[in-house]
Amino acid sequence: MKHLIFLSLLGAFLLLAACKQNSSNTSKDLKDTLANRVKPLVTLPPEYITCDGMANVPNSNDVIMSVPNFSNDTLLKEGKIKKAPPAFMAILTPDNKVSHWYDFKPGDLNPATGKVGPMDCAFGPDGNLYINDRQYFFNKKHNSRIIRINVKNGQPVSMDVVVEKLLSCNGMYWKGNTLFVTESVLQLTDTGTVSGVYAYRLHELNGKKPVQMKAYANNQGDPHLVVKFTSNKPMKSGADGIVCDHQGNLYTTVIEEGAVYKTVLDSNNKPVKTTLFAKDKAMDGTDGIIFDARRRCFYQVDFTGNAIHRIDMQGQVVTLQRNGDEDGKNGLLDQPAEVVLRGNELIIVNMDMAWATPGLSVNKTVNLQHYLSKIDLP
């Protein structure tokens, strides 16, 4: 009898140990799955030093990508490059080949700086590509612009300036004939960063002359300013990514707050009410955001946290990927800034711009080699 009791106790002990071991393995497997969900997509050529905005080409599986190369000066000072490559627009084909799509001509460059800083971009209802030329990294004057690459028969043919005298334009999104643009800095004050969203009608952008913006002052902005935010964090940068959901509501990320705000629009795309939509301890530097109409959720990249998050329609956040200070090799995130959906692939741009966020981001170094990452969605 004692022998049977001993065997029973021994069996129970071994079963408990096995359960604990399986539980430990399950937790480890889950952790590894989350850590390795992201995969490599493209190893970029040497002149792709800083990449940012992405836009799906209408009626195509091609994707256009902005290459502003903002990190040129940093790499020159560190002796990692000997010559600074100019900014350009690239194309990513369905077979994951990248090449130059539009090279900016001397007449396209901003006369105040002699440079162009293409960031977020989006195809308009007219079939042309609109781009935020963010000059804020070159000087802190109102030299930023919205530019348009005119497209004929699917090919870029020329560039026009459609809006001038912006300060720090960043994200953009077309809803019908209205173009929404985030201004990451309207004004820096003693109490924080004032930022906002501008709205332009397509007919305004087809005028004979570019729209001239009025600088924000004394709590008053240009008439195109439709939403305003005030934040107070060391980054000194506010409104960033922008998108609409399937019901036409507008969502804006405020990067230094690690938050996403929802703006209800009326039938004329005028704002009705703006409220906090998502804020979670997992989100640190909320940058680019897109909406997945098929799965009814958002994907949002975390610039300072080296992460990408999924946000449901109730504002609940699930982190799909987070990693430490990596160089982007093997698909790991390296200061991601933008994301685009191509079929069931979530394509992520690693901006790798550590110099812009000293002491604030996981990423500490600007690397010489750069990559695009992806996550395969079910």
Image (cartoon, grey):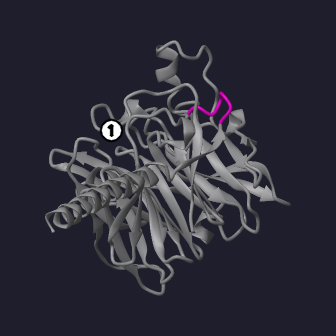
Residue 156 percent across, percent down from the top left? 78, 51
Residues packed near mark 1 inside 10 Å, few (<14), some (14 to 19) or many (20 plus): many
In which quadrant of the rendered view does residue 190 lie?
top left
Residue 94 percent across, percent down from the top left? 75, 55
Magenta-drawn stretch contains 266: no
Residue named by callout 1: 361
Examine the residues drawn in magenta and state their main secondary structure. Answer: loop
Frontmost residue, 175 versus 150 = 175
At 75% from the left edge and 44% from the top edge, which residue is drawn? 97
Three-letter residue code for mark 1: Ser
In which quadrant of the rendered view does residue 347 lie?
bottom right
At 37% from the left edge and 38% from the top edge, which residue is drawn? 324
Write down the region rendered in magenta.
Answer: 44-49
Query: Does dot 1 land on a helix, a strand or a loop?
Result: loop
Frontmost residue, 64 versus 164 = 64
Q: Is residue 196 visible?
A: no
In the image, 337: left or right of 373? left
At 65% from the left edge and 37% from the top edge, which residue is drawn? 43
Quarter of the image with the C terminus in it: bottom right
Frontmost residue, 8 versus 84 = 8
Residue 111 percent across, percent down from the top left? 58, 34
At 55% from the left edge and 25% from the top edge, which residue is drawn? 368
Q: Is residue 315 visible?
A: yes
Residue 374 percent across, percent down from the top left? 57, 52
Residue 341 to residue 329: above or below: below
Q: Residue furthest right?
A: 153
Frontmost residue, 90 versus 13 = 13
Residue 206 to residue 359: above or below: below
Residue 372 to residue 274: above or below: above
